[in-house]
Amino acid sequence: MSNGNANALQGAVKTEKGLSFKGFIMEPIIDKCEGCDRAVAFEDTTYCPSYAKPARKWSYGICNFATHVKAEKTKTGEVKINPLKASKRAARGR
């Protein structure tokens, strides 16, 4: 957890529904978010200013905002790339 994002939740207000920030109700981070540089402590709870519902972000695999998770490598040592992203990069000539 980093304090470098101290102003990331500036203007957030604690309500009875949760933490209200820019019109969204923020949910606290989950255990998989621990160690991420984006996580910010607000009063007694830690939140992700990048995504309001961190548990949902992790439900389909690794959160794409996670700064503490490295890309997986295949058995041959190559980094796994999303096939859709790879095809778009190839189309752009990258």
Image: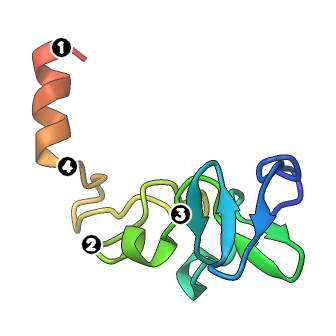
Residue bearing the label numbered 3: 52
Q: Nearer the viewer, mark 3 or mark 2?
A: 3
Q: Which one is nearer the viewer's eye here, 18 or 74?
A: 18
Spatial CA distance of label 4 from label 3 is 24 Å
Q: Residues within 10 Å of mark 1 (few under 14, many from 20)?
A: few
Which amino acid lies under the numbered mark 3 shown in the image of this protein? Ala
Spatial CA distance of label 4 from label 2 is 13 Å
Residue bearing the label numbered 4: 82
Question: Would you say 37 lies left or right of 72 here?
Answer: right
Question: Does 36 sit above or below residue 49?
Answer: below
Residue bearing the label numbered 2: 60
Say whether disc 4 or disc 1 marks the residue closer to the N-terminus: 4
Which amino acid lies under the numbered mark 4 shown in the image of this protein? Asn
Give the secondary structure at mark 4.
loop
Give the secondary structure at mark 3.
loop
Horizontal and vertical percent for residue 61?
A: 31, 72
Give the secondary structure at mark 2.
loop
Residue bearing the label numbered 1: 92
Question: Does 87 sit above or below residue 19?
Answer: above
Spatial CA distance of label 4 from label 1 is 16 Å
Question: Does 66 sit above or below residue 93?
Answer: below
